[in-house]
Each structure stands twice: as structure tokens, then as C-alpha cells.
Amino acid sequence: QVQLVESGGGAVQAGGSLRLSCAASGRTSVNFAMAWFRQAPGKERELVVARIRWRIGDTYYADSVKGRFTISKDNAKNTVYLQMNSLKPEDTAVYYCAADFDPQRWLVGEYNYWGQGTQVTVSS
């Protein structure tokens, strides 16, 4: 079992920055991956915003955030971060941290473990 606890959301003006954190408790493995999703008001949850494989550290970004968001990890703290720069009003959403052990699942955007979500609000 893996428990995920997110923090770091808040309100910021367009062009500003925020950093989200997601602390994972429990075991990891070679193919363990963590990712960030988001869901804007009245919209369906967006597919993976950013993803990182735990041991190797390779990353994936959605086109909508490339060049602005950076996902990183701290193995010692079992924590993944999402640094969000140049924020836009359309980035406003609840951001969810997710994790899974199976590449056949997380490669297609399916995750077994989820955090509670943290609100990010970007004003124009």
C-alpha cells in the first residue's frame, strides 16, 4: 500500500510560481512511477500533467505544461515535486498526485494510488 499526501497549493497571479509536494509512504520499486493530474472546475480530469519514474528519473510532460512545469523527486524523502512557473489562469484546477507500480498501467494513465488533491488558483 502507498499513501500520498499533497501540499503546496494556493492562489497566485498569472505569471507567478508555485511548488506542489507529494510525500509517499510505503514501498517503491524499480518501475514505481508518480504523476500529477489536474481537474479544472466543470471539466473532466486532465490526463497526466507530468510523470516521473522513481528509480530512473525519466519524465513525461503534457504539451500544455512543457517548458513551464518541472517534476522532480527526492528519494531520501520519498517526495515528488511539481514546480510550476509562468502560471496561467487556465492552470487553475485541483491538482492530484498519483502513483502506481505497473508500467502497463501508468504508461496509459492509470494509477491505483491517489492523494487528496490540492487547489491551485491563478488569477489574471
Image (spheres, rainbow, N blue to C red):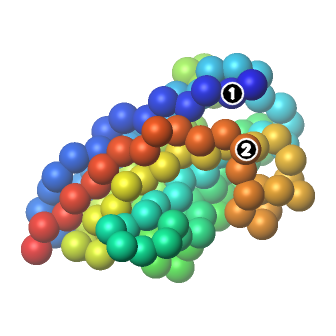
Residue at point 71%, 63% (across, down): 109
Q: Which residue is mark 2?
A: 112
Residue at point 61%, 27% (across, down): 3
Q: Which residue is mark 1?
A: 2
Gap between marks 2 and 1 measured at Cα? 9 Å
Whether residue 67 is visible, yes or no, is no
Question: The disc labelled 1 sits on which kind of residue?
Answer: Val
- Camera-side residue: 112 or 12? 112
**Position of residue 1 measured from the top left corner of the image (x, y, whole percent):** 74, 25
Q: Which mark is residue 18?
A: none
The 10 Å Cα crowd at callout 2, few under 14, some 14 to 19, many 20 or more, is few
Judging from the image, what secondary structure is the residue with disc 2 in?
Answer: loop
Is 14 on the left-hand or right-hand side of 50?
A: left
Whether residue 88 is visible, yes or no, is yes
Mark 2–mark 1 CB contact (< 8 Å): yes
**Position of residue 62 measured from the top left corner of the image (x, y, whole percent):** 56, 73
Q: Residue furthest front?
A: 42
**Position of residue 124 measured from the top left corner of the image (x, y, whole percent):** 10, 74
When the figure is inspected, residue 8 is found, relative to residue 109, above or below; the finding is above
The 10 Å Cα crowd at callout 1, few under 14, some 14 to 19, many 20 or more, is some
Residue at point 22%, 59% (across, down): 121
Is 47 on the left-hand or right-hand side of 57?
A: left
Judging from the image, what secondary structure is the residue with disc 1 in?
Answer: strand
Question: The disc labelled 2 sits on which kind of residue?
Answer: Asn
